[in-house]
Amino acid sequence: MKKRRDIPGKIAIGLTGMSVVIIIAIIVVMFTVIIIGGKDKFTWEFLSTFPQDGMTKGGIFPAIYGTALLVIIMAIAAVPFGTITAIYLTEYASEKSVIAKIIRFAVRTLAVVPSIIFGLFGLGFFIKFVGTGIDTAFLGGNLHWGQPNILWASLTMSLLTLPVVIVSVEEAILTVPREYREASLALGATKWQTIKKVVIPGSLQGILTGTILAVGRGAGEVAPILFTGAAYYLATLPGSLSDQFMSLGYHIYIMSTQSSNVDQTMPIQFATTLVLLLLTFVLNLIAVVIRVRIRRKQYK
Amino acid sequence: MKEIKIVAKDLSIYYGEKVAINNMSIDIPGYKVTALIGPSGCGKSTFLRTINRMNDLIPSFRHMGEVTVDGLNIYDKDIDVVNLRKKIGMVFQRSNPFAKSIFENVAYGPRINGLKAKGQLEEIVENSLKKAAIWDEVKDRLHDSALGLSGGQQQRLCIARTLAVNPEIILMDEPASALDPISTSKIEELIHQLKESYTIVIVTHNMQQAARVSDYTAFFYLGELIEMDKTKDIFTKPAKKQTEDYITGRFG
């Protein structure tokens, strides 16, 4: 019998193979261009000094510092809040609970809202409503909290990253075996004692994963901080929550669109991009490693 | 005269629409070992989990009738289920030590009861491990992870953890079904020692085990209690034919 030629099959294999090659090629080209463009600038001095001469020379230290501060405050806000939400959804809400369904729907929606909307929301809610409210109520109308600052930017960013935290923690809580909860309850522990002493310790890695993913996401986003706290250039580091700050993502945007001398800032743009890319890449890698470890533990 | 510890009267249990136990009554004596036997799905585990209200965790669970422990209706509104579970310990089919040290596993119960004094905790841990016949094997590595122990050791650790809360009743849900014969015989030996001071109810699929460890045996079938009697009577001259068929291996 003659072997039948499976033409559709060959086309399918060809197409899938091509897609893989294209994706890998994009990543390789992207990294290569950025590394080549930025490698000469990528020095310790660049990482540790302030921009100079209208940002055509010098380093990006304030942007790194600002980004770090942003994600730390963001995590302080998003992680406990997200963890508590995840605990409610997994431990307290019954399967049929309408409230739980609404929360889940809200979390999913929050996850797909474009980031610029978060930026506008932050401006409208945190700055104009909360900030101006505080100024009017406690500071006799003096403008202090009713303007962009690192606190409002961080809180806005925490809203954006909240779904990431909630989903990661939820996943981790679900991997805590039912047997542990039963053992704890059978020993006369209350539900809350069981959550505190068995469920949360068992989910710590998941909480950590969620935190890292959220930080990775938050470090790269620009739109949410555009109106809420990021500054074009600052001669000093932010010293309080009501100060503005510089950030890596925003710095790249400024350098590439607002600079008077794009040729001169080009290497700085590349090197800044490299820093941001490495930062998010490393954070995601750590999160992946922890996730794999959780899965292994689960199937043991 | 034997003292009755646990009584179920006209007890029916439902999971949603499904009937798990159908209008059953049983008296379980104190300071004895009572074995619950019967084919899978006969309701014996369901009944066991009713005694410490572990079934409360299942949303579709409903019951009718009455279960009393020391004359108190445990489903009464005034009953504090947390205190009830302190009085009624449970050992599960799959050994389930927490991912903590051996010491912390045993100290878990006393700690959640608010005991903080280190000396007292150490004493309770040592006593509980001794009573569970595992002290000699673990005394030099109390602060190692409990997950490093063998299956049989883990199960005895779980028994020690239960004893540390000082319960009156210990419920055992097929405690040896996942263990090798040597570990199983250690658990059985332990049950023998424990019945001096505790009322034990054990679910088992193993006829020989029921015959070896228990004073009384209750045979369940399709959600009903077919008969209950002294173990030696059940195994030598059962009153019902269904019981005889089951223990001789003709079905189930």
Image: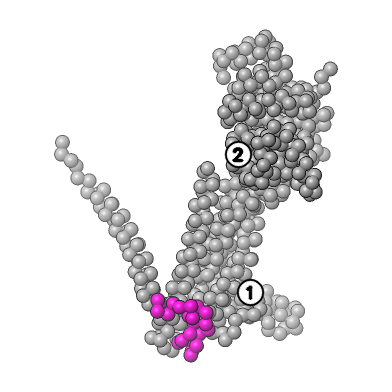
Question: For this rendering, which residue is in front, A200 or B155?
Answer: B155
Question: For this rendering, which residue is in front, A138 or A240?
Answer: A240
Estimate the spatial distance between the alpha carbons at disc 2 and disc 1, rounded to whole Å.
49 Å
Chain of the residue under the numbered disc 1 shown in the image: A
Residue at 65% of width from left, 61% of height from top?
A80
Q: Which residues are magenta?
A: A38-59
User: Measured along the vertical axis of the image, is residue B146 above or below residue A208?
Assistant: above
Residue A280 percent coordinates (x, y): 48, 67
Question: For this rendering, which residue is in front, B111 or A174?
Answer: B111
Identify the residue position indicated by label 1 in the image. Answer: A151
How crowded pointer 1 is (Cα within 10 Å; few <14, some 14-19, many 20+) is rated as: many
Would residue A143 appear left or right of A158 to someone viewing this image?
Answer: right
Any magenta on residue A227?
A: no
Residue at 62% of width from left, 19% of height from top?
B207
Residue B68 percent coordinates (x, y): 79, 29
Identify the residue position indicated by label 2 in the image. Answer: B149
Amino acid at the residue labelled 2: Leu
Residue B91 percent coordinates (x, y): 67, 34
Residue B237 percent coordinates (x, y): 67, 9
Amino acid at the residue labelled 1: Leu
- In the picture, residue B215 is in which quadrant? top right
Residue at 57% of width from left, 86% of height from top?
A235
How crowded pointer 2 is (Cα within 10 Å; few <14, some 14-19, many 20+) is rated as: some
The secondary structure type at the circle numbered 1 is helix
- In the picture, residue A298 is in which quadrant? top right
Any magenta on residue A57?
A: yes
List the single residue furthest toward the top: B237
Pointers 2 and 1 within a single chain: no
User: Measured along the vertical axis of the image, is residue B222 above or below residue A165?
Assistant: above
